[in-house]
Every structure is written in structure tokens, then in C-alpha cells.
Amino acid sequence: MAHPAEALADERPRLQAASMPSNRVSRLFHYGSLAVGLGFGALGEATKRWSGLNSSEQSSGSTSVFLNRANIDRIVSKLTRMRGAALKLGQMLSIQDSKSMSPEIAEVLQRVQNSANYVPMSQLEKAVDQGLGKGWRCRFASFNEEPFAAASIGQVHEAHLSDSMQEKCGFSRAAVKVQYPGVANSIDSDLDNLQSLLVMSKLLPRGMYLENTIRVARKELHWECDYLREAEAMTKFGELLADDPVFVVPRLAGDLSSSMVLTAEFMDGVHMKHAEGYSQEVRDYIGTHVMRLCLLELFAFEFMQTDPNWANFLYNSHTHKIALLDFGASRAFGKEFLDKYLLVLKGAMEGDREACRHWSTELGFLTGYEADVMTQAHVDSVLEIGRPFRATGVYDFGDQDVSSNVRSAIPVMLRHRLTPPPEETYSLHRKLSGAFLLCIKLRARVPCQDLFKDITSRYTFRDGQRLTY
């Protein structure tokens, strides 16, 4: 009999087909029509409120005529259809907690993230033809045209390789990721349009440094749209984790991959969103190794897969292995950054406020000219991140909510911040936040301090020194 978590995992969400605009002109039209629609929606809402015809919005505490119910639906519908930059920016902004933005915009981001549409194969056929050649179907024994997963950049189809490709690749069942048409070429214009829309509507609070978020999103989107780069990252992780007792990486089908198509071994397992149904022992096992992987990526590999999506981890209850998926957001970190970041975390682990302040300034989180309230809020948040590593023995994430406590300082930092965070931390903190939230969801008990000391004691600083505990 299947475990309850595995039974839930078999209930894949039913995706719906929806074509998407694939050239710059059509995408510009859709963004323009959204702006016009939102403007008329706001005008209509203001009129209703002025005349007293829409007291429900006022009584619910909503003060924004722009983010009324009809406009929220318009935004979700349009961004879901546009995919690409719209969904990526939503992911980046959603890592900022709802406490730092209005409930309405938080709802938009959540609904867009949870969207479940896919592009019909008729629209993707040209992209696959370009990537693999017009005779690509003969290299597959079967190819399911309805994808089992759809995301911001592309969608994933299940397939079986032909006999000759099976012999060459060493596996039969494959996952074929196909990039949405027009996404790569429209990144810059899409982000420019989104930035204009966000500035015009004043949707985001001060201090969020939208320009920096857009700049980082632009770079990461270009990375993620290059499937050859992702294939290299997948291969690198396969080598780094070749002897790991827990983590496994799919094998690549290089002859069936291109800049817009990525074919790899299909991995079996349960998504992390279903793993909370497992026993405490299994939840502890998963949480411990996910935390171990984060620390290894930072201070052993110096190369991290930074996408926090829990669907990128699959637990196989038969082999007790955790499969890793989706390497498009992988990136390296420089030694100068890692040296200082490790000293920030070490200060947090030891509860040393002055070390946290000093190394945060050296790293670029602080300028040294902040108001005391800002410095205190920043150091408080760093110490909160370090709390799991400060606890001796096992840290029970089920009894604590590190992420919630960290985010409670965000409103103060948004008001008083003088400089944007270091560029590296946008993706790094997405991953760390995702790991913390997963451990909280699993109510995992993790020996965080032992993991931290074991892995960081083997890290070599630029001057050749190592930490001793």
C-alpha cells in the first residue's frame, strides 16, 4: 500500500492549455492593455467608493482603489498568460514577506505563483524543431504532449527514449523541458514594462530597491533561458554529488538537448510539499540533508542551485534518496563574498552582535551611516537567521518560526535602509529562506550547529586560514 504522502503526490494538478504571446509586439500590447484596464478599473472603483456603492472594499480595510478585486483578477490573469519575466519577478518579490507589502499585492504574487497553465504543443513544436531538428520524434519511443509541470520559463513533458537513445544515454524514461517561445528574446522589454507598471501603480513599498531587483532578475532570467548553461550546471552537480549517500542528480541526454530543450533522466519521488505526511524520523532526515546541502553548496562547492521551489526536491521512500531537479538558477559565489558571509553567519551562530554589524558592513548590507534603529533591526534579523545554528543538539523547527521572526524586522529596514543588499544575496537568501521554510513545514529536528561547524571548519579563506571551534 502506498504511503499517504505518495498517494497525495500522485494527484498531479490538472494543467490547462493556454497560448501565450510570443513576440515583443504582442507582449507589449498585452502589457499596455493591462495598464489601461487597471487604470479604468481604479477609476471605476474610486467612483463606487465616492458614491458609497462599494462599502465592502472599505469595510474590509482595503485603501487602494488600484488594487480592487477586479484589478487583482486582471493582473493575475494577464501575468499568468505572459509567463516568463512576469512570473520570475513575482517569485523574487514573493520572497519578501507579506508584512512588507499590502495584502492585495501579496495575494497577486501568490496566485500568479500557483497558476497552472501550459502552452499547447502546437505552439511549442517550432521551438523543439529548432532545438532538436525536425526528425526529433523518431528519437523517442513515446512523447506525452501534455506536460506534467509548467513554470515561468518552460514546461516539462514525460517521454521514453528510443532503443538507440536508451543505449547511448543509459536510461529510458525521460523528462523533456521545453522553453516557451519568445521568452528569451522578450526578457528585457518585459522587465522594462513591468517596472513601469509597478512604478506607475506604486504597488511596492519604499526601500525595496525595485531597480536592483529588476537588474538581478534580468541577469538570472538570461541564465535560466540558456538550457545549455543549465545542462553544464546539472553535469557539475552530478560530479560534485557523485559519492553523496543521499542526493542524486538526473543524467543528461546531451544529444536531445539544446539552448531551448533540455532532456534528462526522469526521477521518481515525492515533492516536498507532500513530505509532511511522513514520519518524524523521515521528516528529520529530509530536513537535515536539505540543510546540509545548502551549507555544502556555499562553503564546499562554492556553487549553488538557488531556486527555492520545493518541487525541485523529490524524496524516494524506497531508496531513501533525494533527487535534485532544475539547475537553471545555479550560480557560483566569489571567495571575497563567501569569506565575509561566513564570518557574518559565524557571528550570528555565536550571538556576537558586533561581529554581525562589522561583517555586514564589510559585506555591503550596511554603510555605517544608518540610524541606530536600522542597524539594530538588521543585526536582530541576522541573529535570528543564526538561531538554528546557535542551538546545541538538534534544533526543532516545529517549535520555532525563524522566517516569521526575521520578516518582522523588514518594515523597519524598508523605511531606514540606505543601500540595497549585495547582489549575491538576492538568490542566496531565496534558497536559504526556502530551506528554512521547508524545515518549518516538515517540523524537522535538525542538528544545525553540528552541520555548520563540520562543513565550515573545512572551508579555506583566501588567506589560507580555516575556522576552529
Image: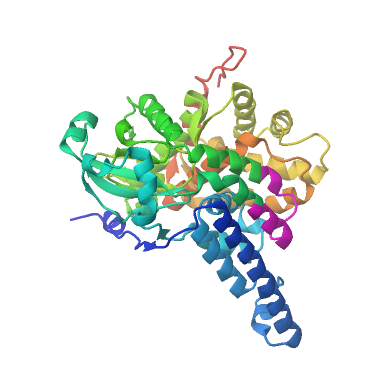
Q: Is residue 356 left or right of residue 271?
A: right
Stretch in magenta: 193-213
Q: Is residue 284 visible?
A: no
Q: Residue 327: image x %, image y %?
A: 43, 37
- Near-viewer residue (29 or 2): 29
Q: Residue 425: image x %, image y %?
A: 61, 37
In the image, what residue occupies the spot 73% across and 78% down? 46
Query: For residue 430, which quarter of the picture?
Result: top right
In the image, what residue occupies the spot 42% across and 29% down? 232
- Near-viewer residue (313 or 163): 163
Q: Residue 58: image x %, image y %?
A: 69, 79
- Near-viewer residue (252 or 283): 252
198 in magenta:
yes
Q: Residue 435: image x %, image y %?
A: 48, 43
Q: How many marks?
A: 0
In the image, what residue occupies the spot 58% across and 50% down? 89
Q: Reply above or below: 6 against 251.
A: below
Q: Quadrant of the N terminus?
A: bottom left
Q: Is residue 428 left or right of residue 4?
A: right
Q: Residue furthest left?
A: 163
- Near-viewer residue (54 or 223): 223
Q: Is residue 126 left or right of residue 401?
A: left
Q: Reply above or below: 85 against 228.
A: below
Query: For residue 292, which quarter of the picture?
Result: top left
